[in-house]
Image: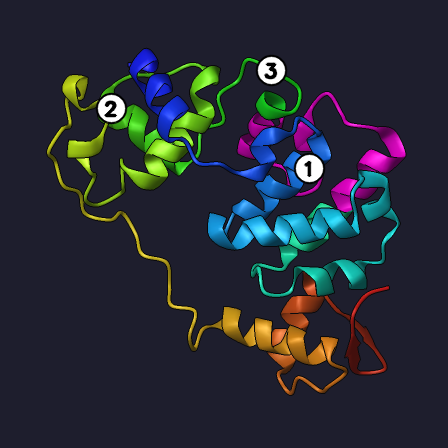
Amino acid sequence: MEALLLAWFRQDGRELPWRKTTDPYEILVSEVMLQQTQVERVVPRWRAWLARWPAVDELAAASRAEVILEWQGLGYNRRAVDLHRAARAVAAAGWPADLTELPGVGPYTAAALGNFAFGLDVLPVDTNVRRIQERTGCSFDSSCAQALFDLGATICLARVPRCGECPLASACPSRGRRYEPLRRQSAFEGSFRQRRARALRAVADGLDPGDEDAVASLARDGLVELHDGFAVLPA
């Protein structure tokens, strides 16, 4: 199966800019952005981010307010704070042997960094990779990571996989099956996440958000600071 997968990937794999680098900082930025944001939206923002802060030391030297403002529009803004903290940790002490010591870096992101930046023999297992492993019964090795990402994102879809286009279909025991989604993400419209986003935009614009609960939540995440009852972006 691995040979079939890699042959397909060489011909049909997506051209993504972070696949052309082994710089751990550039890869960390891509992985953090991709955690909750679609690839198509991440590509231009990743390029803009690296144009502004091309090295980890430069991001570390930026203020948290600058980082939060640059992140606007990507959603889940806590990621920006964690990325900034991670950059400062690396600037101060270098890349740790255990990458999960970095703020916001869990086992998956550590595995992705280890594989793509440091050449470690580790397979980063996200939702797409796990789905393919479960459906095929194959574990796959670390060389298949990017191919698995693309297969899961474009062909081996969560509900209705495109088995007729799949390079693994001839040997896949799950060929032709359909699936119910395990869970649905709650709607953004009218959610507390939307209130937080609106409040953060208001603070960034120097306005009163008028939403104490949202502001308090942002403050707990380090996205705003409260001074004499007024919310401002952190220094």
**Residue 210, percent from left and from top:** 64, 87
Instruction: Please tell me how crowded label 3 is: few (under 14), some (14-19), or many (20+) other residues with Cα within 10 Å.
Output: few
Say which element carries label 3.
Answer: loop
Element class at badge 1: helix
* Residue placed under numbered mark 3 in the picture: 120
Residue at the spot of label 2: 167
Distance from the alpha carbon under mark 3 to that under mark 1: 17 Å
Q: Quadrant of residue 170?
A: top left
Residue 149 against residue 53 in the figure, above or below = above
- Quick check: 186 above or below 143? below
Query: Residue 99 lies in magenta, yes or no?
Result: yes
Q: Amino acid at mark 3?
A: Leu
Foreground residue, 113 or 215? 113
Tell me the magenta residue range. Answer: 85-113
Q: Which residue is mark 1?
A: 26
Other-residue count near label 2 (Cα within 10 Å), few / some / many at <14 / 14–19 / ≥20: some
